[in-house]
Image (cartoon, rainbow, N blue to C red):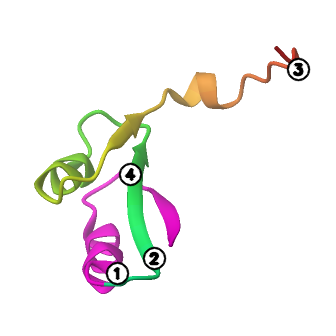
């Protein structure tokens, strides 16, 4: 099974369409919703669908750490 993440920052209607499309698939699972806005409704949609979410700050997204640990 392939796991996909959806990046969204708004209402989440497109994300919901993707979630609905793959909801009963045995090949693809929406495994994560990523957003840079805590107030984005897409996060509520993910919660209703029991999909984990990740909130990232835009500033942190552009920070590069080249240190390999």
Specify few, some or many for label 4: CA neighbours under 10 Å numbering under 14, 14-19, or 20 or more. Answer: many
Q: How many marks?
A: 4
- Sequence order check, earlier mark of 1 and 3: 1
Specify few, some or many for label 3: CA neighbours under 10 Å numbering under 14, 14-19, or 20 or more. Answer: few
Q: Nearer the viewer, mark 2 or mark 3?
A: 2
Q: How far apart are marks 2 and 3 (CA)?
A: 32 Å
Task: In the rendered structure, find residue 22 and report the number of the disc placed on it.
Answer: 1
Report the magenta residues as a range: 1-24
Q: Distance between the residues labelled 4 and 1?
A: 14 Å
Residue nearest the viewer, comparing 2 with 45 = 2
Is 58 situated left or right of 19 in this image? right
4 inside magenta stretch: yes
Task: In the rendered structure, find residue 28 and report the number of the disc placed on it.
Answer: 2
SS class, disc 3: loop
Q: Nearer the viewer, mark 4 or mark 1?
A: 1
SS class, disc 4: strand
Residue at coordinates 63% horizontally, 31% vertically from top-left? Answer: 61
Q: Nearer the viewer, mark 2 or mark 4?
A: 2
The residue to which callout 4 is attached is 33
Q: How far apart are marks 3 and 4 (CA)?
A: 25 Å
Q: Do the residues labelled 1 and 2 touch (CB within 8 Å)?
A: yes
- Sequence order check, earlier mark of 2 and 4: 2
SS class, disc 1: helix
The residue to which callout 3 is attached is 66
- Sequence order check, earlier mark of 3 and 4: 4
Q: Are marks 1 and 3 in contact (CB under 8 Å)?
A: no
- Sequence order check, earlier mark of 1 and 2: 1
Q: Which of marks 1 and 3 is in front?
A: 1
């Amino acid at each position: 099974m392939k796991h996909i993440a959806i990046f969204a920052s708004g209402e989440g209607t497109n994300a919901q369409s993707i979630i609905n499309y793959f909801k009963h698939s045995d090949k693809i699972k929406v495994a994560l919703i990523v957003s840079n806005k805590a107030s984005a409704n897409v996060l509520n949609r993910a919660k209703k669908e029991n999909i984990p979410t990740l909130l990232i700050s835009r500033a942190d997204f552009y920070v590069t750490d080249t240190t390999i640990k």
